[in-house]
Structures are given as C-alpha cells and as structure tokens.
Amino acid sequence: MITGELKNRIDGLWDIFAAGGLVNPLDVIEQITYLMFIHDLDTTDNLRAKESAMLGLPFKSIFADEVQVGDRKIDGKQLKWSVFHDFDAGRMYTVMQEWVFPFIKNLGGGKDSAYSKYMGDAIFKLPTPLLLSKVVDCLDQIYDQMEKIKDSDIRGDVYEYLLSKIAQSGLNGQFRTPRHIIKMMVELMQPKPEFTICDPACGTAGFLVASEEYLMENHKKDIFFDRVKKDHFLNHMFFGYDMDRTMLRIGAMNMMTHGVDSPFIEYRDSLSDQNPDKEKFDLILANPPFKGSLDADTVSADLLKVCKTKKTELLFLALFLRMLKTGGRCACIVPDGVLFGSSTAHKAIRKELVEGNRLEAVISMPSGVFKPYAGVSTGILIFTKTGHGGTDKVWFYDMTADGFSLDDKRTEIKDNDIPDIIARFRSFNCHCEASAHTGCGNPSPSSCHCEERSDVAISYDEENNPRTAKSFFVPKAEIVENGYDLSINKYKKTEYVAVEYPSTTEILADLHELEMQITAGLAELEEML
C-alpha cells in the first residue's frame, strides 16, 4: 500500500486533473499511465544502453539520431522526458501533442503488435498547456519520492493505488494481485528462458512483468548471449488476455517498459470459443476473476465437459489444463470455495486435478491478503498437467502472515511466511538451474544444490512434518477418501495444551482477600474525609 508523502503526492496529482476538467477516473488513469510510460521510456532506454555496454552487446537508442514522426523527421532527443520537461508550458504541450504522443503510438514493432493495436485509438486528452506543465512537474516529484523509497516493488504499488482510485469512484474497478504474492508465485514456479508463459486474465500484466523480472535476475546472460533465446524472450514468450481495453493498454506499456518488445497481449474472452489455445504453454500464472457466474452459452464446450458450471473460478481451472502443454505447470489463486465446495462441478474439477494430473501444492492464504478491496479467503493451487495422473501426495501450507497487517491499512509487519513457503517448497520441488547460480536444475532433493544458498540453508524434512505444523504432506488416498476436499482445515490437526487452573476454593479465597483489601481501603478514605 502507498502511504505517507508519496500517497499525498499521487492524491495531489489526481486533484490537478480534476481542477483541469478531467474527472472521469478511467481517463485520468489512462493519461497518467501514458505519461509514466513516456518517462519510463527515457529511463529504460538509458538503463539498457548501460547494460548493453557492460555485456559488450550492440545497442541503438529509440531516441537515436532523427526519428520519423508522421511525415516529419525530428531530433529524437527532443522526445526524451529529461529534455522536454524543462520546456515552457506552450512548447512542451506542442512537443507532446504533435511529436511525443504520435511517437509512442507507433512503438511496438508495427501495426500487428499488441501494443500498436491497443494504442491505435489512444487519445491525448490534456486540454491545456498549463495542465500538462503542472502534471509533468507533479510526476517528477512523484518519481523523486519513489527513488528515495528504494523499493523494487514501489512501481507496482503506485499502479495498485492508481487502480484503487477507479474502484473508489464507483465504477467497475479492478485491483491487482498484491505484488509480493505475485513475486512469491513466480519464485515458486521458477520460469526458464525457453518457457512460453501465459496469464489468461492478465489485467495490467503483473504476473508477466514479475516473470520477466525473475528471468532478468536469474538468466540474463543465458538470454542475451543466445540469439534464439533473446528473440523468444522479446517476441514470443509472454501471452496475456483480458476483456478490458484500458487494462490491456496498461499491460502492454508495462511490458514494453520492462524491455519486452512484443508481448502478445490481446483482447479476448478466455473462456469462450474466441480462445483456441490448446497445449500451448509451459507455465500459466493467474488470478482469474471469481465474481459470480456467467452465461453458459458463451463458454467453450470443451470446458463444460470437464465441469458443467457457470462459475468462472471452476471454468478457469479447466481452461488452464486445456492450455498447458503436457508437462506444463500452473500456479493460480482460487477462492476457498473451490477447495471444499460440495457441488458436482466443484468435485469434478478437483478430481481432475488429483486423478488426471499431478496436484503438487495447496497454499492457504489469510483472508486479509486482498484488503482493502476484498476480504475473501483464497488459496494457491500448484499443479502439473500430465493427462494421466501422477498425484501421490499433496503439500499443504497454512500461511498466516504475508508481511503486512491483515486489516484495511495493510501496514508492513515483521511476521512473514513467504520466505519459509518458498524455501520449504523448493526443498522437495526444485526447478532451478545451476547456470543461474541458484541451484542444480534437478527436482530431486537428494541431488539439489539449492540448500547451499543462504535463503534455503536450513534443512527441511517435509515428509515427516506432523499435521500440527504449518506445512505437511497428505497422501492421495486420504484426499480421495474425503471426496477430494482440498481445504487445509480438513487435514490440519490442532494441538491442545492442557492448562491447570486454581481450584474453586482457592479462587474464592483470593476473592475474599481482595474484598477485605477493598473494604480496608474504603475505610482509610472515609477517615481522610
């Protein structure tokens, strides 16, 4: 959550738009996002130039030499935020309207790219030079404040706070999955450079961005020193679908800002026949919508064969299984009802995960994780598509703290189960690679070198953990006996500790003594009067 001075500055930016006549929250967030993207293009271009120099790789700035904007050629440096933000209001407005905005609309590798597709109808809506000047100055202050915070997640937090403004305005607002939960899920899945990754309900592309960051942190040299892997990373690795064009624009810009030239981000109803994807992806990361029901007539028929229902949270699980390659893996967030619901459809999808594929883990999260937007209890399912079973036991973890208070304020606290979840899961389910100096790439704990890392230096024995512990294994047979119930409360045991209390006689004696002390005290007070 954004707090303190940064929150006040963002609120102030929102007020500047309102005073300038832009009051529709969707318009405001679009314009802010465009301007942040323009700022980040400058910053990212400089960063990539430095990284390429360090790696000894060729690099050409997007602002290099003359840039073609429409029928004109102009000096590319004038399109850089660090240059035009010092112009007077009138000149800045002309540069932005006539040069910079047309320039960013044509980025993305051509008319067929997802970015060009969703920026094609984007409109620069700031009505006056004075308003633009005030907004640019305010954004400079916001970026200065973000720089002082020195938090790698601060950009995501700013987006979350901006998106919360839509919800607060009474519209059909969207809120993103908390950044630290996204990062945890990516760390658990450990994406590799050769993967093809998808989020079928991508929103602002948070899962895709986090996957890109993980790959850049752990596999940068593998990607950029291999021509095939580099092309795959920039143009063919990331896929995202959504039904909100505003979110698609933000998602496309978010990915480009993070160095992915051509993410495949497309307007698509993932559950309908519009989505033909089958056995296509190595990894799916998602927090699909689970509000209410939908019209079954719009749902792809092959999904209804797996579980006949109108509930989106169940249909998305069936969709993930269809979209994954054999051997592909998924980590997704589901409401608690999916884990223990008693309907035929609930049981059918759970049975498919356990009997037809390999269900690896169920992580139960506390209900406050999505506050202040929602108080729903959720869990994370991790599974591998096999098509012929493979589940012999399932790992359960009872997360009780995520590093933030579980009230609406979500202030940072010391209690945090996330590092423990990642370390314990990797102790028996490692998919890292030695070349990234994070492990051996062997899922067998007996030969995995991840234990040599400082963050997983502790030796774990998850196989023999008692049911009273935070994490433990449950054999498949027991899950089958319980009707494929995946609720952790079904299997977790509570350890009761006997507490001895004083006898009734002793309590009464203590009460009499207290009564005598009170009486004596009252008598002393009366004497003083």
Image (cartoon, helix red, strand yellow):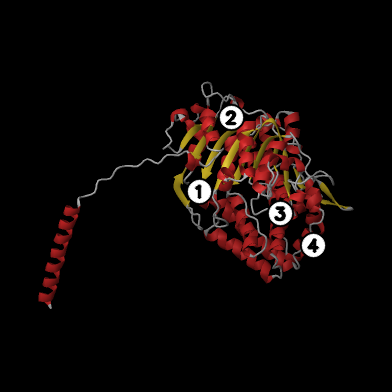
User: Which residue occupies the extreme top position in the image?
Assistant: 447
Q: Of tags 3 and 1, which is closer to the observer?
A: 1
Residues at discs 2 and 1 in contact (Cβ within 8 Å): no
Mark 3–mark 1 distance (CA, rounded to whole Å): 42 Å
Residue occupying the point 16% across, 64% down: 515
Residue occupying the point 72% across, 43% down: 304
User: Which is more toward the observer, 77 or 379?
Assistant: 379
Pointer 1: what residue?
366
Q: Amino acid at mark 3?
A: Trp
Pointer 4: what residue?
94
Residue 168: x and y in percent read 61, 63
Crowd class of label 4 (few under 14; some 14 to 19; many from 20; radius 10 Å) = few
Pointer 2: what residue?
391
Q: From where the camera sits, is residue 455 visible? A: no
Q: Of tags 2 and 4, which is closer to the observer?
A: 2
Labels 2 and 4: the sequence-earlier one: 4
Residue 478: x and y in percent read 51, 33
Q: Amino acid at mark 2?
A: Thr
Mark 2–mark 1 distance (CA, rounded to whole Å): 26 Å
Labels 2 and 1: the sequence-earlier one: 1
User: Which residue occupies the extreme right position in the image?
Assistant: 71
Q: Of tags 2 and 1, which is closer to the observer?
A: 2
Mark 1, secondary structure of its residue: loop
User: Which is more toward the observer, 233 or 56?
Assistant: 233
Pointer 3: what residue?
81
